[in-house]
Structures are given as C-alpha cells and as structure tokens.
Image: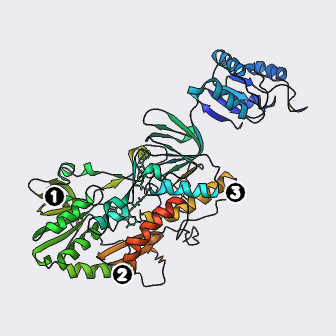
Amino acid sequence: MLQTQRVNDTYFTCGQLSVESLKAAYQQGFLSVLCLRPDDEGGADQPSHQELRRQCEVLGLAFAYVPVEKGAITTTNAERLQQQLEKLPQPVLAFCASGNRAQALYSLAMPKQVEPYYEVLVVGGGAAGIGVSASLLKRQPKLSIAIIEPSEFHYYQPAWTLVGAGAFDPKKTERKTVDLIPYGAEWIRAAVSRFEPDQQRVVLSHGQCVNYKYLIVATGLEIAWDKIEGLEEALGNYGVTSNYRYDLAPYTWQLVQGLSQGKALFTQPPMPIKCAGAPQKAMYLSCDHWFKQDRLSQIDVELNNAGAVLFGVAEFVPPLMAYVKKYGAKLAFQSNLVKVDGPSQTAWFDVTDAQGQVKRVEKPFDMLHVVPPQQSPDVVRNSPLADPQGWCEVNQFTLQHVRYANVFSLGDVCSSPNAKTAAAVRKQIVVVAENLLAHMDGQELPTRYDGYGSCPLTVEKGKIVLAEFGFGGKLLPTFPLDPTVPRRSAWFLKTVMLPAIYWHAMLKGHEWLARPTQATEQT
Ligand code: FAD
C-alpha cells in the first residue's frame, strides 16, 4: 500500500513515486498524478517525468508536470498548480521528494481549502485533555498539537462537594480555559460534532474538518438532567439542588444552613457516574452540619440509591455504615429517582423489590440533593469509536483504542472500568503520553494502567476515608496507613494538597503522584 497524506478529499501528497508504484496509486483510486519534482534532482534512481507519464497513460491515469525548485516555491508555481487542478480529474496524488513541497505549494495555491492538520489532536480541554497535552509537550516540546474545547471556563469539579458544605470557595474551582492551554498547544474553540476515524479527521460544529495523525478522545461524560422528569425546571428552587453543577453547589450549602426540620432526600443514579462517592458525600457533610447544630434529630435523612450497595469496594462499607448509623440516615436501595415536582416538593422513585417488580413510590421532601444519570456524550456514542455502551472503546491497560491504533482515550469518556475520577485521570495521563509517543516511534507500548481511582469520602467536616483502589477493587493506598480509617490528614490532602496538585502539577505536565503501579494485563 502506498503511504499518502490526505490534505482534503481531492488532493493527497506523497514522497518520490517510482514507475512501479504508479499501479498502487491507480489501485488506491487516484485519477491523476502530479509530478512537482524537477527531473534529475535526485540522481540516477529518480525516474524522469516522461517515464512516469508513459506508465500513467498505460494505466489510464491523467498526468501533469509542474517542476518546483526545492526551497524556492514561487507564486508562478502556485498559479500553474491552480491551472492543473482545474483540469485534472480528482482525486489527485501530488508528489515531490518527501511530500513537503506538494503540501506547501497547495497551501499557497488554495489557502482556503487546506484543512488544519496536527500530529496530535485532543478533543476536550477538561482535566484529561489539558493534562495529557501538557505531559506530551513536556516530553516533546515541538509536537504539533491542538486542543478542541468549546468552553470559555474550566472547572475543578472535585471541590464542588466541599462547596456544597461551605468548605471551599466556589470561585477557586473556576479558571479561564485560555490560561490553562499548555505552551506550544493550539486551542480550537469549538465542539466536535462528528468523529471520522477512518478518514483521520473530526468535523466541528460549524462544519470545518480538522485532520490528525493521532487522536486523543477526552470529552468527559454527559450529564442527563433531562432523564428525570421535571428536574431541570425545579433545580435551584423549591429546595432542589445538585453539587454536580458549579452554579448550584452554593445553593446546596444555602439549603443545608436553612433547614432546621423536615425531610432531606439524597439520590444516587445507576452507575457509572463520575465520583461514585459524591452522592453520599453530600449526605454526610450535610448531616455533620445538622449534627453539630443539634438539629439532626428533627431532620429525616434518606439516601435513595439506584444500586444495591452503599459503596462498590467492600472494605470501605463498614466505616461508612458507622457514619450512616451515627447520623441516623435511612438507606433505600434499588430506589431510582425518575420524577420531581418542585412546587409541591414531591419526588418519585422507581423501587425494585427482591422479585424484580418495580413500584413507583412518591416521597415528599424539604430538601432534595440530586445526582443525575450520566452517559457517554452522543458525539462519541454515535461514532465508530464507541463500545456497545457508548464509551470510547480502549484497551483498559494501554488506553489505546481497540480498532484504531492511532486513537487513545482517557478520563470519564473512556471505556476502562475504573472509578471515573480526576485521580484516575492523573495516572492515565502518563499512560497515554508514554504509549502514544512510543507508538509514533514504532515502538511497543511501554506503560500499563492499573485502574487506579480515588474517592475521598468526606464523612464529616475535617475527616475523610481515603478510598484508593484499582481494577477489581484492589486497594492501592498511596500512604502506608489503614485506608479504611477516617483521617484529618486526608481532609488536608483533599482541601489543600489535591487542588494545588491539580492546577500546578497535573495541568502543567508535572507528574506528581501520577505514575501507575507496575500493572500487568493479568492484574
Ligand atoms: P471533564 O473534566 O468533565 O472535561 C471534559 C471536557 O470536554 C469539558 O471541558 C467539555 O467542555 C469538553 N467537551 C465535551 N464535549 C465536547 C465536544 N463534543 N467537543 C469538544 N470538547 C468537548 N474526582 C476525583 O478525583 N475526586 C473527587 O473527589 C471528585 N469529586 C467529584 C465531585 C463532583 C460533584 C463532580 C461533578 C466530579 C467529581 N470528580 C472527582 C470527578 C472528576 O471531576 C472527573 O472525573 C474529571 O473531571 C474527568 O475529567 P475529564 O477531562 O474526563 O472530563
């Protein structure tokens, strides 16, 4: 197969063609060959343009000769190329010694038609997209790399649980995207509306295509607020809130301070969600406030969990149950929020019993903290990159796509079965950066991801059970301490250290606490 570089659907380039290779060009569907290399430039082994023309005639390919001196492309050359492109049947394969002149001449002749091209194209400028770009550029400062991200602002979402408990300034979770784009990367402010991995390009929402050699998919996940009837209209009023939105986390704290009696409902949707512990973290921190204000006995607290267990890693359930008991909270398992009516302060849950029968149950509330259902973004789910559940389908150890070797993915959107957290992203960045660059060099992929994710369970203001675990729930504590014990040091880590590590290390290519354990594919 002839190695060619696509500029757009009508114009492709390559290095020196031999008389024999013209057959491959014909078989790959080209209708014309354009020789841009002056005869005799490369010595005896360079065929003359007449020899190439004769073979093209035999094969039924159109042929044109526009000699361009190396390092001296002129506007006359560009005009001649334009004239030829008006006549030649397309697609055209243009060649010179390396293909570079053929690319540069086209840019000069048809500037508006050249689609941007990057060695690495990153889709999504969240935790994963910015972090991996910074790490790649740290290793190879000259890499041509662009980040496609529509949002003007970037958020440190892990602190929103603290904002909802009055323990963190919301403004400190927001920064301008432009200030975070790593030096050397280009920011394309747009959203991707289609992935076309077979053509090595993405299509932006305004229709422009961007081409790449390697793609990194880091779009995060999509929050499906609309899957709960009445929720969007109620949020921010009637005691209905969610720490999953920047503007609503402060409202959670307002509600917690204002509630002195009544019913407080907390909800957890079906997995997977980002930060699986966040629904109960909101409950513990609210209860802690009511407990310390001596109001808890007047407040009926209930966690409605669409799943069947309090936490997915069994070792952490006993310390969490101790807090559930301390706060007198009720646990309603297999109870999935499906509808909310704000004005009447009523919520409806589909409750599944032991026989699998589903019954709709109505519950009044004074405060409702909702964690909404979450899914892969449509743009990924409806693309050739998706697995059957819609996530970007990667090998969980290498984070390389299983069908497209030049595609990698990390963060919440990738199919790896780890806890979807920024902590996981911190480790995945190293894996993707090292594996992608090795692949670019034709080397074996050197680094394996161990599934590390972390969930700092804020069981009370000032204390955290630091749950750190990998694939299959294997405990992976960073510190040599019993991870099931609530600790003040973990609170300091969560509120002071981790935000600093995020902004100043992870997004800047400094890989602190980032290297995964030496995982093998048998772990
Ligand atoms: P994101 O950071 O969400 O970024 C995705 C980016 O992709 C966004 O900027 C978006 O605009 C962009 N994008 C989307 N679609 C497109 C498109 N079509 N084209 C281009 N760009 C697109 N993690 C922890 O480690 N610890 C915690 O304690 C913790 N607590 C959390 C509490 C809450 C309330 C929440 C909401 C999250 C929490 N997390 C926690 C999870 C953590 O924030 C995420 O796992 C992390 O942000 C994932 O990074 P990401 O880059 O994959 O996604």
- For this orientation, the residue located farthest to the right is 44
Mark 2 crowd level (few <14, some 14–19, many ≥20, 10 Å Cα): some
User: Which corner quadrant of the figure contains ligand 1?
Assistant: bottom left
Q: For the point 63% across and 34% down, which residue is it?
A: 6
What kind of element bears circle 2? Answer: helix
Quadrant hosting residue 328:
bottom left
Mark 1 or 2, which is nearer the eye?
2
Residue hosting label 1: 348
Picture layout, residue 293 above or below residue 24: below
Whether residue 364 is visible here, answered yes or no, is yes
115 or 304, which is in the foreground?
115
Locate residue 257, reporting x and y percent.
Answer: 17, 68
Q: Is residue 427 left or right of residue 280?
A: right
Picture layout, residue 409 above or below residue 197: below
Instruction: Determine contact: label 2, label 3, CB under 8 Å.
Output: no
Residue 443: mark? 3
Locate residue 432, reporting x and y percent.
Answer: 56, 58
Q: Amino acid at mark 1?
A: Trp
For marks 2 and 3, the one nearer the N-term is: 3
Q: For the point 57% across and 58% down, which residue is it?
A: 135
Mark 2 or 3, which is nearer the eye?
2
Residue hosting label 2: 488
Q: Is residue 113 left or right of residue 307?
A: right
Label 2 CB, ligand 1: below 8 Å? Answer: no
Mark 1 crowd level (few <14, some 14–19, many ≥20, 10 Å Cα): some
Locate residue 302, reporting x and y percent.
Answer: 18, 70
Q: CA distance from mark 3 to mark 1?
A: 55 Å
Q: CA distance from mark 1 to mark 2?
A: 38 Å
